[in-house]
Image (cartoon, grey):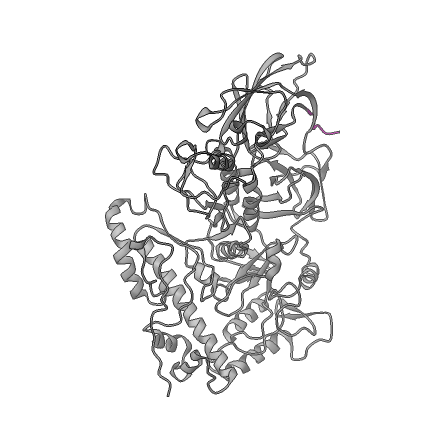
Amino acid sequence: MLRLGHTSTGATTRPAPEPGLGLECDKLDRVALDAHYRDFLGKLMADLGPLAGKSLTALYIDSWEMGPQNWTARFPREFRDRRGYDLRPCLPVMTGRVVDSLEISERFLWDLRQTVLELIAESHAGHLAELAHKSGLRLSIEPYDGTPRDDMTYGSRADVPMGEFWRDTFTTWFSCREATSIAHIYCKTIVPAEAFTSGDGERWQADPASLKALGDRAFCEGINRLVIHRYAHQPWSDRWPGMTMGPYGIHFERTQTWWELSRAWITYLSRCQFLLQQGLSVADLCYLAPEASPQVFRPFGKSEESGMTELAGYRLDGCTPEALLSRMSVRDGFLILPDGMSYRALVLPSVPSMTPRLLRKIQVLVQEGATVIGARPVRSSSLTDYPNCDAQVKRLADELWGESAPAAGIAERFVGKGRIISEAGIPPGPAQTGGGLYPEEHVIRQVLDRIGVIPDFEADRHLRFTHRRAGAIDLYFVANSEPCTFAATCRFRITGKRPELWDPVSRKTRPALAFRQDNGRTTIPLELPASGSLFVLFRHPADELGSQGRNFPEHRGVKKITGPWTVHFDPRWGGPESVAFTTLVDWSKRPEASIKYYSGTASYTTTLTLESPAPGSTPRLFLDLGRVKSLAQVKVNGTDVGILWTPPFRAEITAAVRPGRNTLEVRVVNLWPNRMIGDQFLPPEKRFTSSTWNPFQKNSPLLESGLLGPVEVLVEVSTARR
């Protein structure tokens, strides 16, 4: 005899202060959610009154993090209604026993997990969205991290699906792929990501320049809003760095050394996000997620951990079976969604099972003109209508793939207006390389070549990209992920429009003076600084197939600024009021403890003498600071010419300088660690810093700091056509 019962999993709310600790809510029962909402959020809504939906605009579910759940009081009834049979005879399978046969038991478990997925999606995420909407709020969800269901189906119930990426080795880029896929498939405009999270301790060593490449990668993944993790509210006006979340997240708050100058970086992020929220994403491939729960959409398997998150040159999205069934149709050979998103081909997972309902939908899409890539399934996933369900799968598969398998090569079979393509001789199952669940790259590329889909973007250097289309405007975001400057020849799948280059750092826009259009592509030479990025827009008709010139100006040095420099430090942080620097040097290499351990802002001043320009000439002059640790603000003759936060640390000074003697001021800010390390040599009452978390010791390594140069005045060489 086997006696079965159910109880709480014991999962508790976390992280929470002691008054907030308690058991997690039942995620499968909307009645339980109603009680939780009434006694927690409902009270907050009552206090807010008319401000609900205005001051408080959204509810947010962080990553799952509370383990599995497989039962609720109404589960037997829900299971019967959804699966069509009584689960009680199969319950011993939940204890690890086999009922009837291993196959029967596995099919029951598939049905069980599918029911859990549906209940979480409907009774938890979906119902919470309904409750939020009644209060005038939106719902945002990070639908990943140990969930007992299909991440993308769960996340689709959010108004704002959200991903996450970290600064350290915890690999979560797949969650960004999931969030952007949800948004594109379910017609959602905004795709945020919890940004720059850290688990082993950021230790106050992050600055905007070091964060830029990560943020740009997120933009290339399809993220178009960054939610920075984290801002710690500061209860004190006299303690710096003050309150923290310990080692978690970057230190992004008003007590950060570079807080005042961070507006230049925030402005950059805002420009990028605005443009990347326009129109619709352009993607060629729609990857169908397997009918299975739990399920993480990770099309390239472990290769994603090393940065390979795209079939080079093409964009792809994941699609849930639910969305394929309810939202996908075909027009002119394209798979289309209600808001206009379209794909050239559907890629099936290499798994042996598929329910008849889903396979029947795929058959309809192919008959209407879709191109489908993948191996045939051989059976149903479910115990519902077994064994007749397997016969239905075989019949549908025979109609699509044919009754006999081709001998070798890429097999193509036309069905109705469309076609189904697979690699002959490869049975359903995990791909042989990369740990993925989809046909290998060479198969996908051969199919795309066969149907005439050239890469959307290619370059002769490693560059990331994303592509959006807003009406008649095509917009590409291109990012250099390497810490070095290089030139690259880039090819865009656009012709008939003149390219424009938009720099989101400087906000400068200009037409490309060098490009060539042929064979369905526009080829443009681009130059990108270390971790640099650029928007390439195609808006206006091109009146020619090419143009010769320079897309980026050359700069020639005209004056080296060697000093001496007068450097003013802030005595409040232990610095000397004024010191003469005969040469530029790293503060941490200076012998004076007051400079060596200094953190904060220091102002460099010197004079700059310039000759009068040649008669009739109006040269454009730039100040190049060389290396800066970490941010700088430049003033010439009292005129602010900009905040420099990422390479190249260069600002135009044409309007601020004059012939003869000029005053140059460079305010440089470094990071907190040096002062926090220096404080370890001081008694507590004489320390300059105070923090709820200090990971530093006396022997901790100091960080490079200050204006390192070389500093030089540059003149711009003409970019006119030759």
Instruction: Determine whether, in the image, residue 720 is placed left or right of residue 60.
Output: right
Numbered marks: total: 0
The N terminus sits in image quarter: bottom left
Instruction: Determine whether, in the image, residue 360 is placed left or right of residue 126.
Output: right
Residue 66 placement: quadrant: bottom left
Q: Residue at x 28, y 55 (%)?
A: 40
Residue 697, x across and y down, in percent: 50, 41
Q: Residue furthest right?
A: 722
- Indicate yes or no whether the magenta region holds residue 160: no
The C terminus sits in image quarter: top right
In this orientation, does residue 380 appear? yes
- Indicate yes or no whether the magenta region holds residue 719: yes
Q: Is residue 134 above or below residue 373?
A: above
Instruction: Determine whether, in the image, residue 658 is placed left or right of residue 68.
Output: right
Q: In this view, does 480 lie above or below 353?
A: above
The stretch of residues the image draws in magenta is: 716-722
Residue 717, x across and y down, in percent: 70, 25
Residue 490, x across and y down, in percent: 69, 44
Q: Nearer the viewer, residue 189 or 264?
A: 264
Q: Is the magenta stretch mostly helix, strand or loop?
A: loop
Residue 37, x across and y down, in percent: 29, 58
Q: Nearer the viewer, residue 137 or 203?
A: 203
In this orientation, does residue 333 appear? no
Q: In this view, does 662 lie above or below 173?
A: above
